[in-house]
């Protein structure tokens, strides 16, 4: 609705009292508060209701119009989706299915020679226990050994490297 039509719908303070013969010529006497206002504000609630109705009528065609958004028109969506897809592809380990929490073991015995203190291990989430056939039979985490990325290192201040022919086994959660 054009502004000039909206302005005619809302009555407000103009500060002017119409003069018969100058401002109107209809032959009837104007009624104060109906045909004109003399500077006294109309009821605020009435003005808001009238304005709301005018605005609603003007917006009604747009409110009921249904438009679907095409995903390719969303700014930055394609780039964001590609970034997420790349992150998913980069994560090669997917923990799901029956083996997600499977307890596994690796026999490190083939790496024993009486001098080696660092051993290669498979990738895993959590070490559960390290044990062997040479004293100590059960190794204490942090004190007797530490775990790094695909490595297990014995602390030679606490334990001596196992000799060849002994057994060293690591239990872990895949």
Image (cartoon, rainbow, N blue to C red):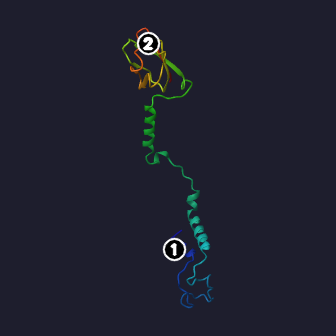
Residue at the left extreme, as displayed: 115
List x then y, in percent, for residue 35: 60, 83
SS assignment at label 1: helix
List x then y, in percent, for residue 46: 62, 73
Q: Give neighbour class at mark 2: few <14, some 14-19, many 20+ (Cα, 10 Å).
A: some
List x then y, in percent, for residue 66: 57, 53
Where is mark 1, residue-wise? Answer: 4
SS assignment at label 2: helix
Seen from the viewer's position, the closer of residues 84 and 123 is: 123
Which quadrant of the view contains residue 49?
bottom right
Which quadrant of the view contains residue 113?
top left
Relative to residue 142, is residue 164 depicted above or below? above
Where is mark 2, residue-wise? Answer: 109
Query: Which residue is rendered at x = 51% and y = 20% of the image?
Result: 104
Query: Which residue is rendered at x = 47% and y = 22% of the image?
Result: 140
Is residue 97 rendered to the left or right of residue 143?
right
């Amino acid at each position: 609705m054009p502004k000039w039509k909206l302005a005619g719908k809302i009555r407000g303070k103009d500060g002017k009292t119409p003069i018969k013969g100058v401002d109107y010529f209809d032959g009837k006497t104007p009624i104060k508060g109906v045909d004109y206002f003399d500077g006294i504000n109309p009821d605020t609630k009435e003005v808001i209701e009238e304005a709301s109705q005018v605005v609603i009528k003007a917006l009604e065609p747009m409110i009921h119009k249904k438009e679907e958004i095409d995903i390719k028109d969303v700014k930055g969506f394609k780039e964001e989706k590609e970034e997420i897809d790349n992150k998913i592809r980069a994560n090669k380990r997917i923990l799901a299915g029956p083996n997600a929490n499977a307890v596994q073991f690796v026999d490190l015995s083939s790496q024993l020679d009486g001098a080696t203190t660092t051993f290669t291990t498979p990738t895993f989430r959590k070490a559960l226990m390290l044990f062997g056939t040479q004293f100590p039979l059960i190794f204490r985490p942090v004190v007797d050994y530490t775990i790094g990325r695909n490595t297990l290192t014995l602390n030679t201040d606490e334990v001596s490297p196992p000799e060849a022919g002994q057994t060293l086994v690591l239990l872990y959660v895949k």
